[in-house]
Amino acid sequence: MADARTKQLQEASSRLVLASHVEPTDDIKAERQRATFDVKELSYALNGGKEILEKRSRYAKELSQTSWGDKSRRYFLSHEEEYVEALKGALGIWEKMRREKLGFDDGAIMRILLDFPGGLELHIGMFIPSLLSQGSPEQQERWLPHCFNLSMIGTYAQTELGHGTFVRGLETTATYDPQTQEFILHTPTLTATKWWPGGLGKTATHAVVMARLIVGGTDHGPHGFVVQLRSPQDHKPLPGITVGDIGPKFGFGGVDNGFMSMDHVRIPRDHMLMRFSQVTAEGRYVPPPPSNSKASYATMLFVRADIVKNAGGVLSRAVTIATRYAAVRRQTAHKPGIRETQVLDYQNVSNTLLPLVGSAYALHFMGESMMAMYHKFEADRDKGDFSVLPELHALSCGLKAVCTWITAEGIEACRQTCGGHGYSRLSGLPTLFQSYVQNVTWEGDNNVLCLQTARFLLKAVGAVQQGQAPPKGSAAYLAGLEGELRAKCSAAGPDCWANNAEVQASALRHWACRKAVEAAQTLAAASGGKLAFEGPAWNNSTVVMIRLARAHCTGVLHATFLEAISALEGAGKVGAAAAGVLRQLASLFALTQLEAHMADLLEGGYITGAQASALRTAQRSLLLALRPNAVALVDAFAHEDYLLNSALGRYDGDVYRALLDMAQGSPLNTTEEGPAWHDVLKPAMSRAAARSKM
């Protein structure tokens, strides 16, 4: 405790510091007063209305007051604790839903808020959807009640040690035995070992196993089979099943990703998912309808659409944390005695964060559109109409890749703008990145998925060049390919670039067309004048194919962004002020993408050097125009502090107090001297002290 004289001497020094000191809570309040639009109005529009936001807030408060929803120790858990606590959280939500008779939408809200992926992830996200999309009505009636009451916990076992994205290459077999009317599930090679399925390690009792169906010696390709893994009495593996956890990963520590091999495991015939294809008792294979020959891929379509939907939500969390922190963090004063500059006012920081805010909005709207497309496909499929499947497959592949790349790279960019504090897990950003970055690989490696999209687009190019029916949907612009290649940019100065959405869309369209022609020419040159979609020629042309897919999907993102703004304004969900700011944000998104790929536009002569310079000027001007609304735009996502679990992203801006408070929870702070003092540090220091006296 300081004496009076000490305090008096310090007082003058403290006044010197306080003269230029700014409380971060005051900075964040000032930022919100700069907003030029109604933040609540936009929040309601983005999140489904006032009632849903109020429900989210209520659930956040309720979860935080439970033992399994308390996040105070989240960043200090061991791997084993993380698995157990994540499972407690998932089961806690399940029990709350049962007790309060809540629907699946309520459960989804709570799972997002808890933000603790665990052993039930694939039970909810893939096992149940597989039964719904591929199971017959009888199979659904038999298994779904057990799934919902958790007497049956499932996972989805597709990926193997030696095969992932290339599903046709799976080595696990399901051989039909007509004498017993059973399938023999077997792992014939080491590389056929199932590897990675979430929940497989220690949680799941059953799995939808993707295996090559062999009937009478004929290989009918991958099909889904429901296989019981563990005994309901003691949870130990059943005979013939070898299963376990794959060990530590980069992140996602609460999920018990597992391995499994099967040694001649027999299952009943009716454990093959038989909504679209069947094997009769006598051993006759009944294939799916020709228009739906890839029915078994429906689950992956759903998951990829869901990944696109979730990308915007995750990126919006990262930019909320980073933007709020950059608005209250001050760094460097250009002369003594004045306040330091807010980090967000440095152009390089705003040039990182504001385009990412735009990307988060673009991904949010794309996610809504993608899921709407998937649900329409489901409705059409139930009527026997599979005509949109090629388009949906191509679009979900490309967008899954592009959206997850933008989000994963964006989280890390946000972390870097937070400086040293961004390296702390207490910022929330390292854990967010660790948990999210696996999305660029799972459910299809992004590069491989881009090749699927490129194949679809090149087939459309070939159809156009041969005078066949023009492509529809997202590839409809390729019908005007020949004229597009002769087109020149009409942008007349920075204002035109910044304010004319059609100029931006035309440039994005031209970029995609240019890449499509380049890809077609590259492939044709490699394959002797024709488009060969398999083999060495294709394998040696993949770089431009991936770039084509990225260009195509970027144009789709921009178009969807603009359509969503018009729809919101047309429905009266946002006023002119909010719509105007969103259009500025859409322009920033487009120009940032175009600037990054300007070489393609210059190389083909679409833009001149002067137009390229004007594009850069326009992009920088949009940074200044949007700066007053930076905090308001991330506030509109309405992420609760409970969800963010971030010292730096707090709504009230009290970031430094939050860092200190959260740090107290470290297990190292349980005692003042620390856990190493008695057994390690004290003996070493005692020996050193003894030697120094000698």
Image (cartoon, rainbow, N blue to C red):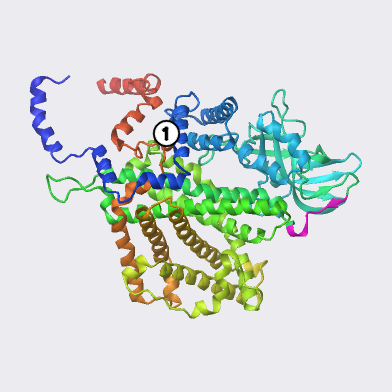
- 403 vs 354, left or right, is right
Amino acid bearing label 1: Tyr
- 650 vs 395, left or right, is left
Q: Is residue 98 above or below residue 141?
A: above
Query: Looking at the picture, how far across and down is residue 331, in whole percent?
Result: 23, 46
Relative to the observer, which residue lies in front, 224 or 198? 224
Query: Looking at the picture, how far across and down is residue 399, in whole percent?
Result: 54, 56
For image coordinates 48% across by 38% down, the residue present is: 52
Relative to the observer, which residue lies in front, 88 or 288? 288
Q: Which residues are magenta?
A: 284-291
Judging from the image, what secondary structure is the residue with disc 1 in?
A: helix
| Image quarter (top left, top right, bottom left or bottom right) of the N terminus | top left
Q: Is residue 475 magenta?
A: no
- 17 vs 430, left or right, is left
Q: Is residue 433 above or below residue 142?
A: below
Residue 660 falls in which quadrant of the image? Answer: top left
Characterize the local packing of mark 1: few (<14), some (14-19) or many (20 or more) Cα atoms within 10 angstroms: many
Residue receiving disc 1 = 642
Relative to the observer, which residue lies in front, 415 or 282? 282
